[in-house]
Image (cartoon, helix red, strand yellow):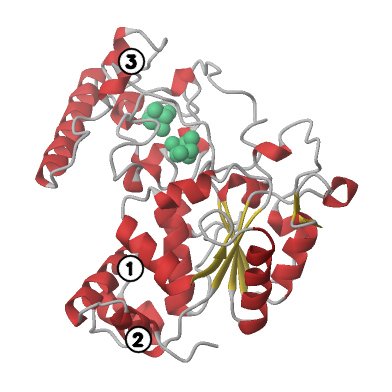
């Protein structure tokens, strides 16, 4: 194992102590640690901030090597990481601190790349984190996905055997994703159906939110273990709420104001997309808070119903854009006897607050649902 600490690596990359503390603050934010009581972190007594605790860990811990495999995928999760809203942070965590092998991003190719994987496996035996993007195929001995003359299924089993933990990134790795959609011609499976003897965590999404991927790797780096998960092995820090819970169109849902067609005046006004098939009420993900494209927007804000891309079998789960005639529950504001108009006003207030917050942060995409919805 590399004897140098993460701090040593960062200092060698030209980091000043001030840069380092800023980096620790960003990391603790990315991991959601600042929302936890300090005493719960790293077993420390109450007192230091989350950033100081992260700094202490990075000064004493060696870097965590990461091997990133791609199986049956579109490389969308890799693409998302390379377009992260915090590219310098993601670049630091993935390129400078962790990743030893990543088929799409690494310079090596062919036999040279495969040799790099085997070398990283031997050098960091039992200590590396295996990130898997894409689903393994089991039919016909995995012949539908062959890399360097070896099936993806065999590569997955071989690489997972000496891994300390496995992170399944994207819906394909977490739940089988699009390759597993009916009729599933390749026999695609979730990684957790193949690898059962290792700590494993799922980061579903199509693609996965890059800050969630990086935050989960950072958690392992700092805490030495994977974060707490829900019943589908998803980190609760990022999948603890539905899209609906934090949706900026929620006041319209509560007020019973719905879009009926993509080009109607309700769509232009940014009303709720439930009747357009929005799966937000049953989909757990962090899109409304983390968003995409440098925090610009996410599907529902841009006028598109949530398709449920972080849930199992979302592609086969009853179809997209299917009109849902009435919300699952009665709208809460209406049920409380408050008029729909109040809900509309509340929506405007929330959109305004969002706009002010964005303007203060100097960000575009300020006023509730995107212009693209209009
Ligand atoms: Fe919920 Fe979707 Fe309506 Fe938002 S647009 S309030 S997530 S149903
Ligand atoms: Fe996916 Fe729904 Fe977010 S479609 S990207 S979970 S808003």
Instruction: Say if mark 3 contacts mark 1, CB within 8 Å.
Output: no
Q: CA distance from mark 2 to mark 1?
A: 17 Å
Q: CA distance from mark 3 to mark 1?
A: 38 Å
Question: In the rendering, at what x and y percent does residue 191 appear?
Answer: 70, 56
Dot 2, how many residues are within 10 Å of its Cα: few (below 14), some (14-19), or many (20+)?
Answer: some
Which circle marks residue 91 in the picture?
A: none
Can the viewer see residue 125 in this picture? no
Q: CA distance from mark 3 to mark 2?
A: 53 Å
Q: Earlier in the sequence, mark 2 or mark 1?
A: 2
| Beta carbon at label 1 within 8 Å of ligand 2 | no
The residue depicted at 28 percent of the width and 73 percent of the height is 24
Which circle marks residue 267 in the picture?
A: 3
| Beta carbon at label 3 within 8 Å of ligand 1 | no
Q: Earlier in the sequence, mark 3 or mark 2?
A: 2
Residue holding disc 1: 27
Question: In the rendering, at what x and y percent does residue 30 appear?
Answer: 34, 62
Dot 3, how many residues are within 10 Å of its Cα: few (below 14), some (14-19), or many (20+)?
Answer: many
Question: In the rendering, at what x and y percent does residue 87 appear?
Answer: 33, 55
The tally of labels here is 3
Question: In the rendering, at what x and y percent does residue 249 appear?
Answer: 32, 29
* Quadrant of the image containing the N terminus: bottom right
Residue holding disc 2: 8
Camera-side mark, 3 or 1:
1
Instruction: Say if mark 2 contacts mark 1, CB within 8 Å.
Output: no
Instruction: State ligand 1's quadrant.
Output: top left
Choose between 24 and 234: the one closer to the eye.
24
Choose between 244 and 225: the one closer to the eye.
225
Choose between 306 and 211: the one closer to the eye.
211
């Amino acid at each position: 194992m590399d004897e140098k600490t993460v701090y040593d690596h960062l200092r060698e990359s030209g980091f000043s102590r001030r840069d380092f503390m800023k980096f620790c603050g960003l990391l603790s934010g990315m991991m959601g640690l600042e929302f936890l009581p300090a005493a719960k972190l790293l077993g420390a007594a109450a007192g230091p901030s989350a950033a100081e605790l992260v700094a202490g860990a990075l000064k004493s811990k060696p870097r965590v090597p990461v091997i990133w495999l791609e199986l049956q995928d579109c490389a969308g999760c890799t693409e998302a990481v390379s377009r992260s809203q915090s590219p310098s942070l993601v670049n630091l965590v993935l390129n400078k601190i962790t990743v030893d092998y990543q088929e799409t991003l690494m310079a090596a190719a062919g036999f040279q790349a495969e040799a790099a994987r085997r070398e990283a496996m031997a050098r960091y035996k039992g200590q590396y984190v295996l990130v898997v993007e894409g689903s393994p195929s089991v039919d016909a001995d995995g012949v539908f996905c062959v890399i360097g003359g070896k099936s993806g299924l065999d590569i997955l089993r071989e690489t997972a055997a000496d891994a300390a933990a496995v992170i399944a990134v994207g819906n394909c790795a977490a739940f089988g994703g699009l390759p597993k959609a009916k009729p599933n011609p390749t026999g695609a499976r979730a990684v957790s159906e193949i690898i059962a003897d290792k700590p494993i965590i799922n980061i579903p999404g199509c693609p996965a939110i890059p800050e969630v991927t990086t935050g989960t790797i950072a958690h392992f780096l700092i805490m030495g273990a994977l974060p707490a998960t829900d019943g589908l092995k998803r980190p609760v820090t990022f999948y603890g709420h539905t899209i609906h819970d934090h949706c900026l169109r929620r006041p319209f849902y509560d007020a019973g104001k719905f879009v009926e067609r993509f080009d109607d005046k309700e769509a232009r006004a940014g009303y709720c997309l439930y009747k357009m098939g929005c799966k937000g009420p049953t989909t757990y993900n962090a899109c409304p808070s983390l968003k995409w494209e440098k925090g610009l927007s996410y599907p529902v804000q841009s006028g598109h119903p949530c398709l449920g891309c972080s849930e199992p079998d979302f592609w086969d789960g009853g179809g997209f854009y299917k009109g849902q005639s009435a919300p699952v529950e009665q709208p809460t504001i209406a049920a409380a006897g408050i008029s729909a108009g109040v809900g509309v006003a509340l929506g405007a207030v929330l959109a305004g607050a969002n706009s002010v917050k964005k303007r203060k942060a100097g960000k575009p995409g300020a006023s509730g649902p995107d212009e693209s919805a209009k």
